[in-house]
Image (spheres, helix red, strand yellow):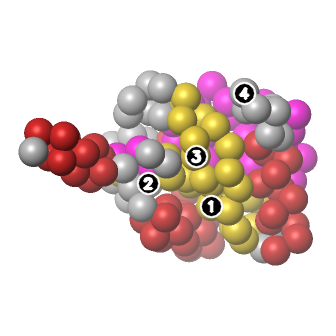
Amino acid sequence: MFATVTGSALASDRASADDAVAMVKKAVAAIKANGKDKAFADFADPANKDFHDRDLYIYVYDMNGVAVAHGNNPKMVGKNLMDMKDNDGTPIIKSFIDVANTKGKGWVDYKWPNPVTKAVERKSGYVEKVDNLVVGSGIYKP
């Protein structure tokens, strides 16, 4: 019984795919309604629960791979991360941009440090193209 309770507790700490899609759509709406500067400040503010929920946060890249907003690691902002790869060699940001440019929106699988567990875990990032930006959030997989 303990394992079941623990598993359920851990599951509730993880956001769902629907949660990630909803947060990205909320972020896209914020950019359109409030402009980039205000939206990016909101994405960076950990107290803003619209854009920080359990293991979910918003990240935004331009089409050259430069991070313009990052809800979990502000040190990434301003850096060109086009060539960044996960431990398995997956080109994360390039994959986001490829999906945004070919489909307009979609999912990318990669590995990334979980801000809750601090461990590198399997993650699926949902991204949408907005003008010349890629807006995303992602879920960690058990």
- Residue position for label 3: 123
Three-letter amino acid code of the residue under disc 4: Asn
Camera-side residue of 61 and 13: 13
Magenta range is: 54-83
- Give the x, y percent position of residue 92: 76, 43
**Mark 4 or mark 1: which is in front?**
4
Mark 3 burial class by Cα count in 10 Å: few <14, some 14-19, many 20+ = many
Rounded to the nearest angstrom, the CA distance separating label 2 from label 4 is: 27 Å
Question: Residue under circle 1?
Answer: 126
3D distance between C-alphas at marks 3 and 4: 12 Å
Amino acid type at circle 3 is Lys
Cα–Cα span, label 3 and label 2: 18 Å
Tell me if mark 2 has few (under 14), some (14-19) or many (20+) residues whose alpha carbon lies within 10 angstroms of its own: many
Q: Mark 3 or 2 closer to N-term?
A: 2
Q: Is residue 23 magenta?
A: no
| Distance Cα–Cα, label 1 vs label 3 | 10 Å
Q: Amino acid at mark 2?
A: Phe
Mark 1 is surrounded, within 10 Å at the Cα level, by few (under 14), some (14 to 19) or many (20 or more) other residues, namely many
- The quadrant of the image that shows the N terminus is top left
Sequence-wise, the earlier of marks 1 and 2 is: 2
For the residues labelled 4 and 1, the Cα–Cα distance comes to: 19 Å
Contact flag, marks 1 and 2 (Cβ < 8 Å):
no
Q: Residue at x 44, y 33 (%)?
A: 115
Query: Is residue 74 covered in magenta?
Result: yes
Q: Quadrant of residue 65?
A: top right
